Structure formats: C-alpha cells, structure tokens
Image (tube, rainbow, N blue to C red):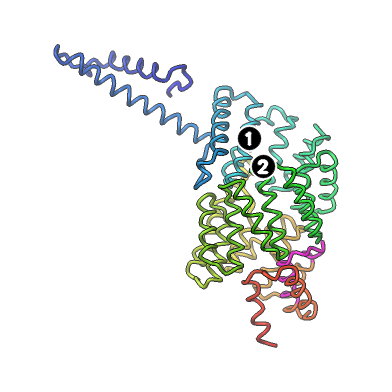
C-alpha cells in the first residue's frame, strides 16, 4: 500500500521510480547518444504513472470512507463545497488517528447533516452509525455520541430503539434541549402523543428555538389546531437563519400547512422564498410541482418534479410524479413511475441485521404498492408497520386505506376511527374517513366528513375526488 500520509507525494514517487530503475537496469538504454534523454523520458513516464496511481488510490479511499457526490444544481452550491471540504478534512483526521473519538463524533454529525441536506439518508446514516457505535463501544456515556446514535435511529425509523438511547443521554445531561427533541419525535412516531407533548414542553422551556417551535407546530397540527400550528411554525422560521437547511425546511412545513388548508397563494409564496434563500432545494421544487398539479398545469409540474429528482432521487418526489402522470392521463408513465418508487424504497431498507440497521420503510412501501395497484403487497407491509407501532395515527390511516381498497370496509372503518382519535383536521384523513364511513354504511357521517375536508381544502387530491364518482353514480 502506498504511504499516502508522507510529507511529499511527488518526492515519494520520484524516489520510488529511481528504486525501480536501480532494481531493473534493463529499463535503461545503454546507447551513449540516447542514454540520457531516454532515461529522463522513462523517469518522467514512471513518475507520471505512479502519481496518477496514488492520486486515484487516495480518491477511492476517500469515497470508501463515506464521501458521496451530490446531484444536479446542489453539486455546485457553496454549502456543498464547504461540507465536502469539512468531511474530507475530518476523514483525514480519523484515518490518521482512529482513536480520536472527538473527530469521529464530528464526522458522524457531518454525515447526519449531509444526509438531511442531500437526501442520501440510507448511505450517510449507515456511515454515521458505524462511527458512533465505535465511539460508544469504549465510551458508553459519551453524550454527543448517544445523541447522534439516537438521531440516526430516528432517521432509520427504529423509533423503539431510539428511546432508550435518548434516555441514556438524558441521564448524562438532563439539561440539554436536544435530548427532549429526540424523545418528542420518537414518542410521536410511536403514537404516544401525551408523552410527546410533555417532552416538547420541556424542550421549549430549556431552549425556545427553531427546533422546539417546529415540534410544537406539528403536535398542534396532529390535534387539529391549524391556527396554532401556523403560529408556532412562523416562530420557527423567524428563529432560523435564512438559507440554512433547517430554516428552509421549516419554511416548507409552513407552506405545507397553508397548502393543506387551501391557501395556495401563501403556500406558493413560501415555496418560492425557500428557493430564493436556498436555490438548490429539491423539496421546494417538488412542492411547487404540487401547486402546478392543483392548477392542472401538468407540464410545469412534471418539469419541477424532474428538477427535484435531478438533485435528489427521493421516493416521495417519484410518488408525486406518479400522481401527475395518472391525473394527466398518462397511464403507462404512471405505472413505470409507481414501480420505480417501489425499487427506491426497497433499496433504502438495506440490511436489517442487528449489526447493521437499514431503514424501516413498510408504511411507505404500503402506499407505494397501493399506487401500483398491488393491494395484497400493500396489506402485507401495512400490517408489518402496524404491528411495529400500532398507535401511530398515520400508520392506522394507511392500514385503513389499504382495507378500503381491498373492499373490507368494516376493517377499514375500525382503523380509520382509531386514526381520528386526536381530532386531526388533516383534509386527506377526513376525506378518506368519509369515503370509508359511507362504504361501511354510515352514509350521513361520511358525507359530513367529506364536506368538512372540502371546506378545509377545496383543492384536495383529484385522485381522492375520483373515488367519489362511483358513489355519486349509485345515488
């Protein structure tokens, strides 16, 4: 192996070439008139070869340690160049001193942030987990490593495992707001909403900032308080620095709340602002595509989603593209797109062994199989997710909708009723509940729920509205 940490790469290559020529003198031509020139030519050629080989080796070694290039416009952004340089520097530190736990933790958090910014969750989460586990192996009370590991477990949808790790971090430092944010997220995803509220309140009391405000907003949304959710998310956006990933993510969430409540103008303004402050923001282009889709401007919607996918091959963007193809009467493209979503999600799941967690993606796969009209596979994955976290209202809603598609309306009614227990005013939830109630024989309740959904958001998904046509025809 080449000693790539030597002070002078070129000195090493030159000396290595001279050694080769000394050991293999046949490489030198003995003709007096040609000897000097040919020797220099051979030396130069070997020098160039070994320089190229060592540089190539160093590049490949860096990639093996976790550096993954971004796509599209984000690949030339100043933020990416800064992140890339920081990651490469930390990789060098860890390579030279594998026992440097501080550098390992910093590199792990750089991976976690790059995971969020680039959307390469499965790739960077695995790299971060390896680093953090190596730190915790010999330093079980390392607070930063515990926080990092819990964060990665949340990203991988291993919510049950994140809770004890976060609680261990809490014992080390009970006055850090970060640990309560992780616990808020984990309890929300597991459907323990009361505990989530308690953790979010504790977090806000310790540090009222962008992270605590955004969590409060989501909890208010879950419980049907859209005005309160907007208020808290506006505080989150104002507490952040424009252009930072966290700030623009919150701006996107604020836009989505307005979109859900039918205020397309405000939503579009916020999505456009996110692009202004963060030009290579794939999520914002995908959000603008939803506005275009609602306006039935399908070519522009396809263009915006394609732009988002060029930066980040996120399965959610591909799902949006599937819907646009479907409602614009392009069934072949819709079918191909739906299959691609399944491939993307299946690839994201990765290794589920105890040593190397991949991502749990069964809820997402259930929805993807619904889009592909494979209802039996959708049920399989929906049940896996439900057995994993039976109290989460989104999981209950997904399972209910699968049963609706399978024609088992009584089962669908059972699970959609569970999903509505927090009094959420999500218009998609209400509309689906209305359709299920009508099919289950509760026509009056179903009609009221559908009307309520349309009052909250008159622009509700056209695919959902198509579900009403057979019911209207049988009146």
Q: Is residue 342 visible?
A: no
Span shown in magenta: 418-437
Residue 338 is left or right of residue 409, and the answer is left
The secondary structure type at the circle numbered 1 is: helix
Measured from the top left, where is residue 265 in percent x and y? 67, 62
The residue drawn where x is 81% and y is 53% is: 192
Give neighbour class at mark 2: few <14, some 14-19, many 20+ (Cα, 10 Å): many
Give neighbour class at mark 1: few <14, some 14-19, many 20+ (Cα, 10 Å): many
Q: Is residue 350 above or below residue 268?
A: above
Overall secondary structure of the magenta section: helix
Nearer to us in this view, 218 or 189: 218
In whole angstroms, how far apart are the C-alphas of marks 2 and 1?
A: 10 Å
Measured from the top left, where is residue 164 in percent x and y? 77, 41
Q: Identify the image quadrant of residue 466.
A: bottom right
Nearer to us in this view, 37 or 455: 455
Q: Quadrant of the N terminus?
A: top left
Where does label 1 land, which residue? 108
Q: Is residue 382 magenta?
A: no
Image mark for residue 152:
2
The residue drawn where x is 70% and y is 67% is: 428
Which of pointers 2 and 1 lies earlier in the amino acid sequence? 1
- Which residue is at the far bottom? 475
Measured from the top left, where is residue 458 in percent x and y? 70, 71
The residue drawn where x is 81% and y is 59% is: 225
Q: Is residue 424 magenta?
A: yes
Q: Is residue 441 visible?
A: yes
């Amino acid at each position: 192996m080449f000693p790539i940490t030597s002070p002078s790469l070129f000195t090493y290559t030159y000396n290595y070439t001279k050694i080769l020529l000394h050991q293999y003198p046949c490489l030198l031509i003995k003709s007096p008139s040609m000897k000097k020139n040919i020797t220099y030519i051979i030396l130069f050629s070997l020098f160039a070869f070994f320089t190229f080989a060592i540089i190539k080796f160093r590049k490949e070694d860096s990639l093996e340690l976790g550096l993954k290039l971004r796509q599209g416009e984000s690949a030339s952004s100043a933020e990416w160049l800064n992140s890339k340089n920081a990651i490469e520097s930390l990789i060098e530190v860890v390579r030279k001193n594998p026992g440097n736990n501080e550098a390992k933790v910093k590199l792990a958090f750089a991976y976690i942030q790059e995971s969020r910014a680039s959307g390469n969750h499965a790739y960077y989460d695995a790299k971060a987990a390896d680093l953090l586990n190596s730190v915790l192996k010999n330093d079980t009370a390392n607070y930063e490593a515990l926080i990092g590991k819990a964060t990665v477990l949340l990203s991988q949808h291993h919510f049950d495992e994140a809770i004890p790790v976060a609680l261990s971090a809490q014992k080390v430092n009970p006055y850090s707001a970060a640990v309560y944010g992780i616990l808020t997220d984990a309890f929300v995803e597991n459907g323990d909403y009361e505990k989530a509220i308690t953790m979010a309140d504790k977090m806000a009391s310790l540090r009222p900032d962008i992270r605590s405000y955004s969590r409060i907003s989501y909890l208010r949304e879950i419980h049907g308080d859209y005005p309160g959710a907007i208020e808290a998310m506006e505080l989150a956006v104002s507490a952040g620095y424009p252009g930072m990933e966290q700030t623009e993510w919150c701006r996107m969430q604020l836009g989505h709340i307005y979109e859900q409540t039918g205020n397309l103008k405000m939503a579009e303004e916020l999505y456009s602002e996110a692009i202004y402050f963060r030009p290579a923001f794939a999520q914002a282009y995908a959000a603008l595509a939803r506005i275009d889709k609602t306006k039935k401007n399908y070519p522009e919607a396809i263009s915006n989603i394609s732009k988002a996918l060029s930066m980040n091959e996120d399965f959610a963007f591909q799902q949006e593209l599937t819907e646009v193809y479907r409602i614009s009467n392009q069934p072949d493209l819709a079918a191909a797109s739906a299959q691609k979503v399944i491939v993307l999600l299946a690839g994201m799941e990765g290794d589920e062994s105890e040593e190397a967690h991949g991502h749990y993606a069964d809820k997402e796969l259930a929805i993807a199989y619904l889009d592909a009209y494979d209802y039996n596979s959708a049920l399989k994955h929906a049940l896996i997710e439900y057995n994993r976290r039976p109290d989460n209202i989104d999981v209950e809603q997904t399972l209910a909708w699968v049963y609706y598609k399978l024609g088992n309306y009584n089962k669908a009614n059972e699970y959609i009723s569970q999903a509505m227990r927090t009094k959420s005013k999500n218009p998609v939830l209400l509309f689906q509940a209305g359709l299920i109630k009508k099919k289950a024989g509760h026509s009056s309740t179903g009609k009221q729920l559908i009307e309520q959904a349309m009052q909250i958001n008159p622009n509700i998904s056209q695919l959902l509205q198509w579900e009403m046509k057979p019911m209207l025809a049988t009146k």
